[in-house]
Image: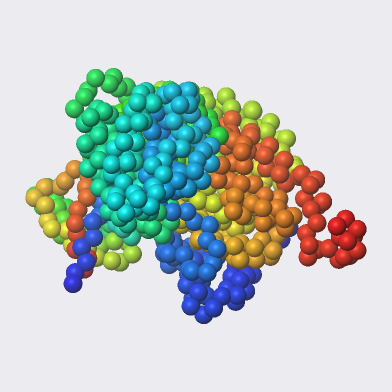
Amino acid sequence: MTERTRTENEALIQEVLKAYPEQTKKDRAKHLMVNDKNVDKSKKCIISNKKSQPGVTTMRGCAYAGAKGVVWGPIKDMVHISHGPVGCGAYTRAGRRNYYSGFTGVNNFVTINFTSDYQEKDIVFGGDKKLEKMIDEVEMLFPLHKGISVLSECPIGLIGDDIEAVARKKSKQINKPIVPVRCEGFRGVSQSLGHHIANDSIRDWLLSKRDEDNSFETTPYDVSILGDYNIGGDAWSSRVLLEEMGLRVVAQWSGDGSLSEMELTPKVKMNLLHCYRSMNYISRHMEEKYGIPWLEYNFFGPTKIAESLRKIASHFDSKIQEGAERVIAKYQPTMDAVIAKYRPRLQGKKVLLYVGGLRPRHTVGAYEDLGMEVVGTGYEFAHNDDYDRTMKDMKDATLIYDDASAHELDEFVKVLKPDLVGSGIKEKYGFQKMGVPFRQMHSWDYSGPYHGYDGFAIFARDMDMTINNPCWSKIPVPWKQADKSSLAATA
Amino acid sequence: MSIMPNVIIRKNQQGQLSFYVPKKDLEEMVVSIEYDGPSAWGGEVQLVDGSKYYIEPLEAPPQLPLTLRVKRL
């Protein structure tokens, strides 16, 4: 395997851009770059968080997807109403596999789709009455819910319904918090704005609820996990490590999280932030209002986990620092065994990533622990500050792409010839038909957890299972079929 | 027209002042600040990337982090 040089990758970008008309070419050129470690600010090399070009197939979602699917949806003891027509809620139902404990439909509601199912008459006459009625029904059918969030779909903003007024009125009546979230899908350029809107709604409607209430007994070791959505149990395999080293995890945001956990978060000593993109807003707010410092960490792969555990511990006393060393020492033999088993099978394999949130940079350490190399990475909806962080974590001359289109990804894969592509469900079947080993890295391809030491063992197994699967050579890629007669025989 | 963004000013772990403009995802270290004494804080601020901002001087150093409206120079 020879490493690709900067010139080769720059030439590849030019080649890919050739397919576009002049204006699109000019725009897309700003979103593609070859990593240069000497530059410390990404905005000199890459432009991000801009509207996608018309005509290219973007993989992005909408503000509603960011607010409902990512931030609000996993909070388990609240009812999340998809306010508007039925489709948005139906097609985002349970897709992210945010695991939770409890009894669905009794005290937990994550996988149930609540929607106001807008009809023409609601668009014409307004749907506030319908929302009121719906809240009454929720209260009657699911009395153990702790609160309601109202997540607006596009029409709500277009027809000007006053969901804030309904929320205030009904909240008084049922004596539970009701949070109106103005996350209409047309806002912003991607799901990223949805995260921000959701963070702001938590800040404005929930977070200060227990400011006057000091009945919660705190300890000097209280922390919260922010930006872990418990996909396939991620937050659980992270939480055990923090607890083993002596910290007390007060809240999980928002995977397997509950309303009271969120309300108690302002009482913690430190916020631990996994997904920077979706929860930096609330972290910065809590730092300003409550003086709670926040710390980014990375729980993918033993190298990064050990680094993160030590970094977290350095903000606490010697008891926690010893705890961190104890945890690292305890899991090291298991991790060595995992690496001894899988590294020989995966050594030197090339990975191309195109995901969202934190994965394009956070998973790099885990691949490197297995001897694999990330040859290209990119985000659907990152901002400049994500690329600042990414450039530090990636090797020099790595290809980096923002909001890549289907055409760009196809061409990159054809030339870079990665042994594994990690991306989302929209890319999955295209690449599988090209005979390229693929893993859906948004929700771990129905596997997981991947965070923490327990997660790394599963991560390594899954990567081996995918790359070394004998099926890939059996897939008849049409343009690789030299002999047409063999196709005719099987037709 | 002068541009007046909202910024969050905080101290990082090394104790340096950092300047965060949420709307622009700009997070940059502060190189110099005009008044940084016990009796005044603020004034002209220069960032690592060379850009300059003006903070209406406060009478005492504030509790950080702090959200402020500043003027871009």
The colour scheme applied to this rendered structure is rainbow
Corner quadrant of residue A198: top left
Q: Is residue A59 above or below residue A151?
A: below
Q: Is residue A487 above or below residue A315?
A: below
Judge by depth and name the residue closer to the eye, A332 or A285: A285
Measured as percent of width and height from the top left, residue A338 is found at: 67, 33
Position in image of residue A379 (x %, y %): 51, 55
Residue beneath the point at 60% across and 76% down:
A18
Toward the bottom, the furthest residue is A22
Is residue A320 toward the left or the right of residue A180 in the image?
Answer: right
Looking at the figure, which quarter contains the C terminus of chain A?
bottom right
> Residue at left 32%, top 24%?
A220
Q: Quadrant of the N terminus of chain A?
A: bottom right
* A270 or B17: nearer the viewer: A270
Q: Note whether A15 is above or below A428 in the view shown.
A: below
Q: Work out whether residue B29 can be spotted.
A: no
Image position of A248 with respect to A471: above or below: above
Residue at image location 19% in from the left, 59% down from the top: B70
Q: Is residue A69 visible?
A: yes
Answer left or right for A123 relative to A56. left
Name which residue lies at 59% across and 30% down. Answer: A454
Toward which corner of the image does residue A185 lie, by quadrant? bottom left
x then y, percent, for residue A366: 59, 42
Q: How many marks?
A: 0
Expressed as whole percent of the image width and height from the top left, the position of residue A47 reads 44, 65
Report the residue that reaches farthest toward the front.
A121
Comparing A125 with A400, the one in front is A125
